[in-house]
Amino acid sequence: MTGALLDLGRMEYGAALELQRRLAGQRARGEIPDVLILLEHDHVITLGKKTSPENFRPQDVPVFQVERGGDATYHGPGQLVGYPVLLLEDHDVRRHVRNIEEAVMRAVRRFGIEGERLEGHPGVWVRGKKLASVGVTVTNWVTYHGFALNVNTELSYFNLIRPCGLDPAMMTSMERLSGETISFDRVKEAVGIEFSSVAGQTFAPRSLENLAEPGNVK
């Protein structure tokens, strides 16, 4: 079966959250195939189920309390956000998280960046700095939420929070690591290719309107 890749450009966080929830319900009912959403958000703070008061303080940036695991994090321009909406047939959430990490590590390797895992801290790390965050939720064995990869992200916005409970200085970006602005479209393409490889199915570009085409739903 072929999955669907939705490139949604820049989308407001609340609209993207509602879209994920709707697609997760459709996937659980077998109405659509697995979906990988790739997009950017405007400046926003999201608070996961484990957010503690000391890791967040009120500010002017919009804030959303969400159902994903993890703590507070920031999304904004220059950051590639990926939301895999997948049916976990093996019910293995840990494997799913590791697959996301693996896909991101393979993608950034194409740009000369060697990412790695840090035990106890989901995401992708480079020499002790966090390059990508991962946080998911599961309902009816369909997963949504996903990852945020700092490509050309303005890292100062992480000072608004303690990202995932960490010192904001622990965050890094592909731009900072390479010393140059990175092609956002090339990163998006690389992530799509590598996620397909890791997931064992091709995520082909589709539109929201034709997600439920016959022969593409399992």
Image (cartoon, grey):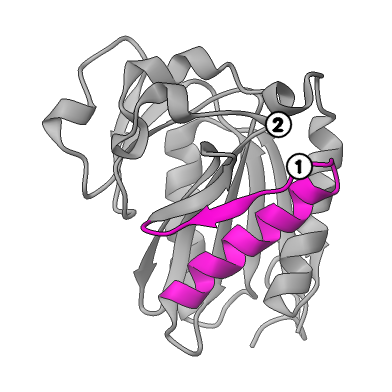
Label ID, residue 113: 1
Left or right of residue 218: residue 190: right
**Displayed quadrant of residue 113:** top right
The image quadrant where one finds the C terminus is bottom right
Callout 2 amino acid: Met
- Range drawn in magenta: 94-120
Q: Which residue is at a point 36% across and 32% down the rendered structure image? A: 163
Q: Which residue is at a point 42% across and 57% down the rendered structure image? A: 21
| Nearest to the observer: residue 177 or residue 6 | 177
Q: Which residue is mark 2?
A: 174
Left or right of residue 115: residue 67: left
For marks 2 and 1 on the same chain, the one whose residue lies earlier in the sequence: 1
Would you call the spot at circle 2 few (<14 residues within 10 Å), some (14-19), or many (20 or more)? Answer: many
Extreme residue toward the left, this view = 53
Q: Is residue 105 magenta?
A: yes
Would you call the spot at circle 1 few (<14 residues within 10 Å), some (14-19), or many (20 or more)? Answer: some
Instruction: Tell whether label 1 touches label 2 (CB within 8 Å).
Output: yes
Callout 1 amino acid: Ile
Which element carries disc 1, helix, strand or loop?
Answer: loop
- 123 shown above or below 78: below
Left or right of residue 181: residue 80: left
Q: Which residue is at a point 64% across and 52% down the rendered structure image? A: 37
Query: Picture coordinates of residue 149 (x, y %)?
Result: 61, 40
